[in-house]
Image (cartoon, rainbow, N blue to C red):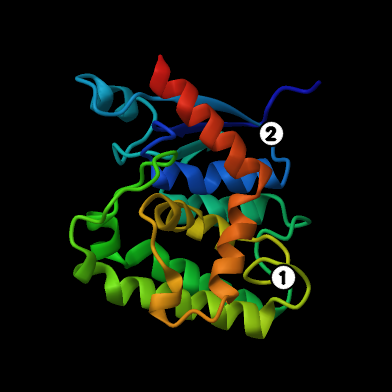
Amino acid sequence: MAPASYKLVIGDKMWSSWSLRPWLLMRHFGISFDEVHIRLRSPDTAAQIKAYSPSGKVPALIGDGQTVWDTLAIVEFLADAHPALPIWPKERRARTIARSVSAEMHSGFVPLRQNCPMDFTARGLKPLDLSAITGDVARIVEIWRMCRKNYGAAGPFLFGEFSAADAMYAPVVSRFVSYDIDLSKHDDDGVAAAYLATMMALPGMAAWGKAATWESAQ
């Protein structure tokens, strides 16, 4: 077997939502990589990350003689490096919307992040402030329903087939499960809930959860 072309530097799978995104994307599309796991919340965490990532944050992707940091930059790098893979939807209008909703996730939804930090395998958690996340949850439901209705005919994912947009929303999927968020209370007609179930059934999500449990036991 040929050696992996990339190293993907990530944090703990239980907590590192940004690490999940490129990890899931690369695993789904069969892009080989060696994983560099850095323990978070440790005295030497910052120094360990800085040895790989100039931003001092995870994830970082090392390959092709360079280091790429920031999740969305990694996604775009991989899309450029592997043009045969449908990392973004092939149809131009769908690809434009996929990039837009991915960028919205990348830069927004701060109340949801703050009040529902990712704890991947936990269940029955309660948001720190439920009222603070109402707008974010409603907007995410709106995005999921819109994408599924307008672009999802070819499969069960946001744009039919799995794409980078699904990877970008994977941590939110896990948050909704961990915090028992009832999507029907946020104008979901069942479409968003069905999409959530599809994402949680992905082999990559199951593998991430299994590894998160193992890491936490070490």
Give residue 186's position: percent from left, percent from top.
39, 78
Callout count: 2
Rendering quarter of residue 203: top right
Residue for badge 2: 32
* Residue 93 appears anywhere in the view: no
Q: Nearer the viewer, mark 2 or mark 1?
A: 1
- Looking at this view, is 27 or 63 the one in front? 27
Rendering quarter of residue 76: bottom right
Give residue 12's position: percent from left, percent from top.
39, 31
Q: Residue at x 64, y 84 (%)?
A: 149
Badge 1: few (under 14), some or many (20 or more) residues near its Cα, within 10 Å? some
Give residue 129's position: percent from left, percent from top.
18, 61
Lateral position of residue 110 relative to residue 58, left or right: left
Spatial separation of the CA atoms under disc 2 and disc 1: 24 Å
- Looking at this view, is 95 or 141 the one in front? 141
Q: Secondary structure at mark 2?
A: loop
For the view shown, which residue lies furthest in the right direction? 1
Q: Quadrant of the C terminus?
A: top left
Q: Is residue 23 above or below residue 168?
A: above
Amino acid type, label 1: Gly
Q: Secondary structure at mark 1?
A: loop
Instruction: In the rendered structure, find residue 184 and report the number of the disc placed on it.
Output: none
Q: Is residue 14 above or below residue 74?
A: above
Residue for badge 1: 160
Amino acid type, label 2: Ser
